[in-house]
Image (cartoon, coloured by chain):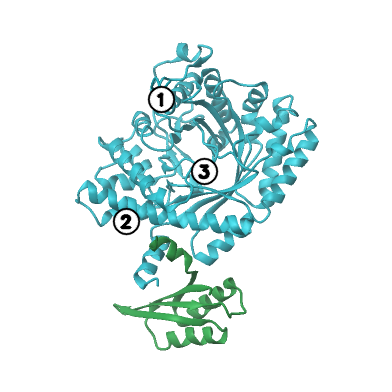
Amino acid sequence: MKKTIITVVGKDTVGIIAKVCTYLAENKINILDISQTIVSGYFNMMMVVDREGATKHFQEISHDLEKVGEEIGVVIKCQREDIFDMMHRI
Amino acid sequence: MINMSEVIETNEMIEKENLDVRTITLGISLLDCIDSDLETLKKNIFDKITTTAKDLVKVGQDIEAEYGIPIVNKRISVTPIALVGGAACKKPEDFVELAKVLDEAAKTVGVNLIGGYSALVSKGTTSADELLIRSIPMALKNTERVCSSVNLGSTKTGINMDAVRLLGEIIKETAEIDKENDSMACMKLVVFCNAPDDNPFMAGAFHGVTEADAIINVGVSGPGVVKTALQKVRGESFEVLCETIKKTAFKVTRVGQLVAKEASQRLSIPFGIVDLSLAPTPAIGDSVADILCEIGLEYAGAPGTTAALALLNDQVKKGGVMASSYVGGLSGAFIPVSEDQGMIDAVKAGALTIEKLEAMTCVCSVGLDMIAIPGDTSCASISGIIADEMAIGMVNQKTTAVRIIPAIGKGVGETVEFGGLFGYAPIMPVNKFSCEAFISRKGRIPAPIHSFKN
């Protein structure tokens, strides 16, 4: 399993999750978990995904998602899960 | 599974609090390059560095992209060149040739600095060591990325005062030769007592002779993260203060450990150490002095500064040690003046002097770092400053260093501009009284007694 964390931050608008999920589905990236909240009009989402089945390379996926974010006016970041695991789990 | 607040916390550290990995430094042994023919030696050195380090920058960039953590510098350290060049170099100019090869190799593989133009003379100076030391001004003038260091003393051997005297002259000469650039070449020259073999930070990085053929060392940094964490515990007890620093240092160092392991695996080069450091940059909020202020000082340099720094340094180590499987290098808080906006402000406000900085170096890594002094400071006074700092290292069994910049043609009240990560420095006054007769004595200071162990 190649766990990756996708974070989406920006002004709330219609279809953010739809756009991101469509991209992930098209690229055979499996969503394991989603949590989402809106703090004073700002949309915060975190997804845990598995890119085991994806054909694209990490950096390509990351770049594509950045572009998707630009289209809908949010910032999308893609990071391997290990950095969070290392920092927050002993 | 990782939760949202943990992800947000990590990303805020990176985006808002300047958390970064300061350097991945690839140590390369050049001992197998040694040849008595200078041209063969040059070719061997260039080939070894460009082969071993060919993927270093690319791997660094990949790790940055995949984890979303900036890795500010990718660097190389090599075996002290005085050892490598001893058989082939018969005059200082020959050593300058080797410096140019290092520079060329650094440019070829795309690293911004290469360290190891060094000599280890803590007890005595070989003729090769002396040739290298005498070549330093020309070598630094004629290269862009080469960093030089000289180990002048150690707890076990005492202080080589002949070399201390010589380095006072060499630092001045380096400043003179580069005076049109605000004597910036001096930034790339540092002298040590108890220099570590595995330090990843420049200008003092070299690949010690006790090290393996190649090794990955990583230096982390995060003064901004510690400062932000401390903002939340204002007015709390020392216990809470220390726990907060410790926990934060743990998190920062874990990132360094991850990057080090990953780089080591991808380059198929063994992981050496993580250097647990708080290394500031001139960026606002990335300052060790600001942490001291957050602990409760009006400015760095105020009474209490040494105690606050001792506390900070110790807690960073306590938190960091558990976060990494191997710890080494300099490990501690750095207090360079020009690279830390809070330090610069303290000097400008009249709160911080060289004497106070010297006291601070007793309790933290590393030493008098990036301090601009008047250009008319005598060679003997520079040697005196070095000797004082070496004595602190020798007696306290710790690494100490001096990296000072005599700004030729400038005096107290003026500033020198270094640019980029190196920042700028207000010129600090140096005690005017002479130490000429002390420095002109020949020989060395004997090693100190620590206890009658045998």
Looking at the image, can residue B274 be seen? Answer: yes
Mark drawn on residue B228:
2
Q: Chain of mark 1?
A: B
In x, y percent, where is residue B73? Answer: 55, 51
Q: Amino acid at mark 2?
A: Thr
Q: Quadrant of the N terminus of chain B?
A: bottom left
In x, y percent, where is residue A65? Answer: 52, 77
- Taking the image as shown, residue B202 lies to the left or right of residue B317, namely right
> Is B377 located above or below residue B190 in the figure?
above
| Helix, strand or loop at mark 3 | loop
> Is B323 located above or below residue B432 in the figure?
below
What colour denotes chain A? green
- Taking the image as shown, residue B3 lies to the left or right of residue A40, namely right
Label 1 sits on residue: B395
Marked residue nearer the N-terminal end (3 or 1)? 3
Q: Quadrant of residue B126?
A: top right
Label 3 sits on residue: B201
Q: Residue furthest front?
A: B454
